[in-house]
Amino acid sequence: MMPQCTDQPRGKAVSRRNVLAGAIAGATLCLSSLSASAQDELVLAFIPQENPEKLLGDIKVITEYLSKLIGVPVRGFVTSDHAAAVEALRNNDADISFMGALPFVIAEKEVGAEVILSEVYRGKPVYTGRVFVRRDSGISNMEDLRGKSIAFADPISESGFLYPLQSFVDAGLLKQGEDPKAFFGEVFFAGGYQQAMQAVATGLVDAAGASQYAELLLSADQQADVKWIVESDPIPSHVVICRMGLDRGLKDKFVAAMLTLNNPENKRLLAHVYSPDGYVIADPALFEGVRALARAHGYLR
Amino acid sequence: MCRNPRIRASFLAAMTLALMLPAVLFHGRSSTAHIVTEVPWHPVAAAYRTAMFMGDLKPVPWSKIRAAYEKANPAAYGTKSAQQKLTELDAALGKEAATLIGRSIDGQDRQALYAATTRVLSRAIRIHLEAAHASLRDPSAAAARIASARDLYRAIEDFIRQADNKAFGKLGRAWLTLTSSAGTSGVLGGGASGADEERFQQARQTIDAYLIANFEPEVFTPRGKLTPLPETVVASKAPVKIAPWLPPGSSLNDQDPLPLLVLNFEMQGIDEKDLPLIAYGDMLFDSPEIFGDPATSLGVTCSTCHNRSDINRALFIPGITHQPGAIDVDGEFFNSRFNDLREDGLDIPSLRGLRFTGPYGRDGRFASLRDFTRNVIVNEFAGAEPTPFMLDALVAYMLEFDFLPNSKITGEGQLTKAASDAARRGERIFKQPFTEMQDNSCASCHIPSAKFLDRRAHDIGSQTGSYAHSQSTAFDTPTLLSTRFNAPYFHDGSLPTLASVVEWFNLRYGLGLESDQREDLTAYLETIGDADEPYEVYTGRHTPFRLAFEELTTFASTLDTLLPARDAFHAKLMIDTVSADLALDAAGMANTTAKPMVYELADILADIGKAIDAKDWPQAETRWASFKLLQDKYDAAMY
């Protein structure tokens, strides 16, 4: 089977302007998919870490591999962001998407998406968010950050916003749902882990909220200059989700193919799917905390 | 939402890291073991930095500068060239870039090149920001434009930080404000927020104003060096110190897999800590402190090129290395005083079995390893004159480099029972005289009982003479031991495999070897060049960090000799190397929770250095005793 790598989803391009139209059309398409006994291709949506062009090479490698194992052409495309990926699932423009836990619980609620695989890091399908400061800042606890500036990664991020922020709520420094500016002097969204970590390492802000592993995005000498002072509760790792109504046989084949990436001889391929240590079958119950937090912040209606 | 909650952390030496900061090469000193794969660049940013770097080489490689703009850069994302990206962004800008940059290259005018490329870069950033502003009703579109502008700004950001730190802070906060005020689409409305256009506008104005004043002035002050600096800073003639930097696509990473180091004393079970001269030489081999800038700041050491006594197939610096694993060590960049004004890059030779392989240098120009080593330090990499002790130590250490153990040949170079039939047939061809080679055989120069070399230079026709009727080309016969793992071959690395070497000789000398004969001869070369274990194998807690930790603490053990001798100079050199390396190496620990312990050990070493500076030797000895206690205490966590 010949894999394909394009920058377009199945069907026409998706934009947020046709959300309503998509929602109506989506119901129909889902029904038609449910009734289909087989698909002639599997479409994967990838969400870019930074510039979408950076992902294209990775997509080619992984779709070629999956095509051979699954027996149908596997095609991948890069979405502009999580919203576009979720819309592509809803509109049947994509069958599968790689995604964070927060957008997954929104996709689950809004378009019936199903979580099928979880990324594994150091033996667990969870990680944490942390608040980093410069080692020489004199800041040693959460209270020290009152009135200070902080750069979070992104408002739609578990480890880069919601979970680190929740640590301040749990400590009684912020009320649930309260504007973070009620505690911090300035709040920025830097656009990603790397930008947030750079902001604190170079002294642009006093603190950064990011994944526990974001420290590794700094150069070696910069890493020696920062420390973390807050660690969140465990967060479910990023996931692979599928659209409602995806043919069960195809889904099972995809899951089985993805799990072969755990085999030692295939580990190198993990670098082409965001570099986890491996994958496990996802446990939907693991996301209850994310659902609760998303509800608390109004992300889930 | 960010991808990649965990960025793989394996990796000191030669391991690839999925997403790491490009800034690593530009934040003061770094060490070879810690340099990691750079994040792909925006094609225009990659072309710009490549052009500025190459524009400072002498002679300027103008054709490579042109290619930097007209061809896709391997260090950039996507498949489009800088010129294509500029045209795609704005047709008028693309046309202007092609005209002005092309004219400066045609005219070989460095100042015009700086002006044209700098203005184009700055304009491209501002065009993206203008488009982002116009897209604020669509936060995703605005975010994409801001990201592109930011990717372009990356080309000059570190220079602004070093030359105009106050502006760097102001601009940095403006970029944070841009991303924060552009709003977010959320996911299906969840988490969505609108843009704050007023804040966005203010931040954009801050960036625009700085760029126009500093990167798009009507006239640029004449530049001696093309490192991009804000015009207002240059015009003010304020002193500016910029850390040495390398162009996109450069790699000082160790090769992966890491070659196995075979030290003669170690194979005999002797502890390096009981050999302080050799341990000190080992430290110097891994120390950028023995060189001068730019090598020191970039963390270049002997082992940068000679990983674990072998080669570094990954080493690459555009403009300086003609292919990975090669380098021109007498060019403008590392020591302008030693610039021979010739593009004559050499494939990095292995140092295995060094005590048998003299004379030294690809053409055998140095009879003495000591002279060769001094030339590397002082001339090639601009270091200060080494002390006799340093040279003694380096030479003592390098003379311990052994070839890789190979059960397929004897010490006399004869095949053992473990060799294949093909290799045996190949051996006969290897030893067969050819009239086309003046009745010489391969073995005439590669003498099996003499470690497969004859310690002489020969002109075999592998390079054309540098001028008419010259006698200027001959190269030292290389050993064939351990060579299966250090391809490519020949002085310039022009032959990728041992099979291609056989093919080259067959054609060059018209030997008439049939296909099966060539295969047999290749099998023989692969057999005598083989090894039982060629590479370092990491398992469990034997991680790259553990390897580095054991080495660094061995280096530190020389304080047992240096402190009682009150040898301040050599003790400080060691401490400056090991303290910095320990802290940097911690970045690659698998056991990340133990990082603070490593920083603590590094701090103690730094304290010893301060005590030595203060001539407080008792304090230095007290702190050294503390170091050893803590080292024992933390040992199990050091992986």
Image (cartoon, coloured by chain):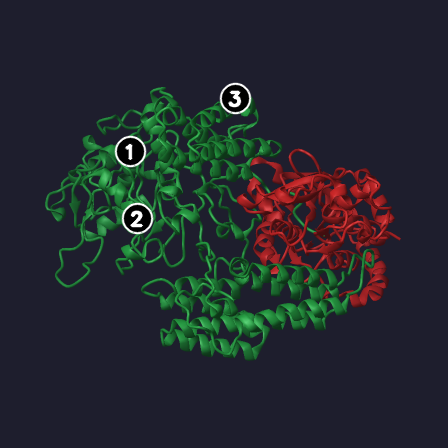
Chain colours: A red, B green
Instruction: Place residue B254 in its image quadrant.
Output: top left
**Which sits in the foreground, B336 or B473?**
B336
| Type of amino acid under label 3 | Leu
Residue at mark 3: B629
Residue B17 seen by the camera: no
x, y percent for residue A227: 64, 40
Secondary structure type for disc 3: helix
Q: How many marks?
A: 3
Position of residue A5 in the picture relative to residue A238 (left or right): left
x, y percent for residue B263: 34, 28
Q: Are marks 2 and 3 on the same chain?
A: yes
Residue B627 seen by the camera: yes
Task: Nearest to the eye among marks 2 and 3: give it.
Answer: 3
Position of residue A215 in the picture relative to residue A84 (left or right): left
Residue at mark 1: B389
Secondary structure type for disc 2: helix
Residue at 63%, 57% in the rendered image: A50
Residue at 36%, 37% in the rendered image: B285
Chain under callout 3: B
Residue at mark 2: B500
Q: Are marks 3 and 1 on the same chain?
A: yes
Q: Disc 2 or 1, which lies upstream in sequence?
A: 1
Instruction: Place residue B255 in its image quadrant.
Output: top left
Marks 2 and 1 sit apart, C-alpha to C-alpha, by 43 Å
Residue at 64%, 48% in the rendered image: A71
**Which sits in the foreground, B443 or B19?**
B19
How many neighbours does mark 1 have within 10 angstroms: few (below 14), some (14-19), or many (20 or more)? few
Marks 2 and 3 sit apart, C-alpha to C-alpha, by 55 Å
